[in-house]
């Protein structure tokens, strides 16, 4: 589009790191950078409020350092300066901080008291009603409408695409391999996967995910809980992840109410059948057939067992074809079309 890009983030995306993690050198597109504070750098209390406050100050710092025609925000918890609200586009992954949206908070009276002011602030600031909102799924669009009373445009996020051969995995000794993809964080409910693994001792489970310093204790707890048929691939490189995907026929996803689920589409592109909870975008947006959605641990065991037995090369090819509709090229084209139209309407 010929636009200059000024980035405000907790860490500059170094070339080697971005190539290793996502296979793209994003530094070639960055014309300026403002260092923001990371989640692991804030004080260990009132985290949701700190993130909200810091977002405002770093937003102001970005505007002071660089002259911008408009700002693209990739998170819904950012407080936008009022004078920039109408020139801001927010890609909302979910209209609530993931940490305080979990059932652990909703089931605790003390925690409900803690999040009540946060919800009031988040849901009533004028900026969010003046900004342009796009989001990752119809499921999240509905949640935004409920929380903020405004509409959003759905643009599905870019998902990794693979081109390696979809060889018949029934013919090798990895035929009963299940994987998972995602961050190791309590909201993802990895305990469900570990319980399913215990009930399927003859199946190998490979958990591929990243972990931040503040979540290492949670990962250690998972490792102590895991049965002998579970292997953890922590902060795996792209190649290590691909090696796991090449050997897997099923991906078990444990997040309840997944906002979109890039990992779901990524698994499909690798010819892997996703088994997910019967909620979120997997259900509302029709990403996963009902026959591969579960309600509890017992039905998860049933769905995984069924998926393992039904996998074949034709199924894998159909999954990959479906995943192509969520490629980076599709995302860029959809976003570019949206931005050009938006710019024309906001001269």
Image (tube, helix red, strand yellow):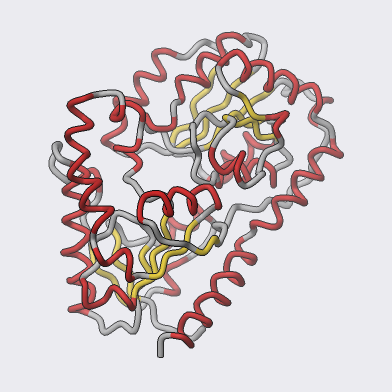
- Front-lying residue, 116 or 246: 116
Q: Is residue 315 left or right of residue 331?
A: right
Q: Quadrant of the C terminus?
A: bottom left
Image coordinates for residue 177, horizontal then vertical, percent: 67, 24
Image coordinates for residue 337, horizontal then vertical, percent: 58, 77
Examine the image and state in which quarter residue 284 appears.
top right
- Front-lying residue, 226 or 61: 61
Q: Is residue 27 in view from this perspective?
A: yes
Q: Is residue 21 in view from this perspective?
A: no
Q: How many marks?
A: 0
Residue drawn at the location 49% of the way across and 54% of the way down? 141
Q: Is residue 21 left or right of residue 122?
A: right
Q: Is residue 26 left or right of residue 177?
A: left
Residue drawn at the location 62% of the way across and 9% of the way down? 201
Image coordinates for residue 37, horizontal then vertical, percent: 21, 55
* Residue lying furthest right: 314
Residue 287 position (above or below residue 13):
above
């Amino acid at each position: 589009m010929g636009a200059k890009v000024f980035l405000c983030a907790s860490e500059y995306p170094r070339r080697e790191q971005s190539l290793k993690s996502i296979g793209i050198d994003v530094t070639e597109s960055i014309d300026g950078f403002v260092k923001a504070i990371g989640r692991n750098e804030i004080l260990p209390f009132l985290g949701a409020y700190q993130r909200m406050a810091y977002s405002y100050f770093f937003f102001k710092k970005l505007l002071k350092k660089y002259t911008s025609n408009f700002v693209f925000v990739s998170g819904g918890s950012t407080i936008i300066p009022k004078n920039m609200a109408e020139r801001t586009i927010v890609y909302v992954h979910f209209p609530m901080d993931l940490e305080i949206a979990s059932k652990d908070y909703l089931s605790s009276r003390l925690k409900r008291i803690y999040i009540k002011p946060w919800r009031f602030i988040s849901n009533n600031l004028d900026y969010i009603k003046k900004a342009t909102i796009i989001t990752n799924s119809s499921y999240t669009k509905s949640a935004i409408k409920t929380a903020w009373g405004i509409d959003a445009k759905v643009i599905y996020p870019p998902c990794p695409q693979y081109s390696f051969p979809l060889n018949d995995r029934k013919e090798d000794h990895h035929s009963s391999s299940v994987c998972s993809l995602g961050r190791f964080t309590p909201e993802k409910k990895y305990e469900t996967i570990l319980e399913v693994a215990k009930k399927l001792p003859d199946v190998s489970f490979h958990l591929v995910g990243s972990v931040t310093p503040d979540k290492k204790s949670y990962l250690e707890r998972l490792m102590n809980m895991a049965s002998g048929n579970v292997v953890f691939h922590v902060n795996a490189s792209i190649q290590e992840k691909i090696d796991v995907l090449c050997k897997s026929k099923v991906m078990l996803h444990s997040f309840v109410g997944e906002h979109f689920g890039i990992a779901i589409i990524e698994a499909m592109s690798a010819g892997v059948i996703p088994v997910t909870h019967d909620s979120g975008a997997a259900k509302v947006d029709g990403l996963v057939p009902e026959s591969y959605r579960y309600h509890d641990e017992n039905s998860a065991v049933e769905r995984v067992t069924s998926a393992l037995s039904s996998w074949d090369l034709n199924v894998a090819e159909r999954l990959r074809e479906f995943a192509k509709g969520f490629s980076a090229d599709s995302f860029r084209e959809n976003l570019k079309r949206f931005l050009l139209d938006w710019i024309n309407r906001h001269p």
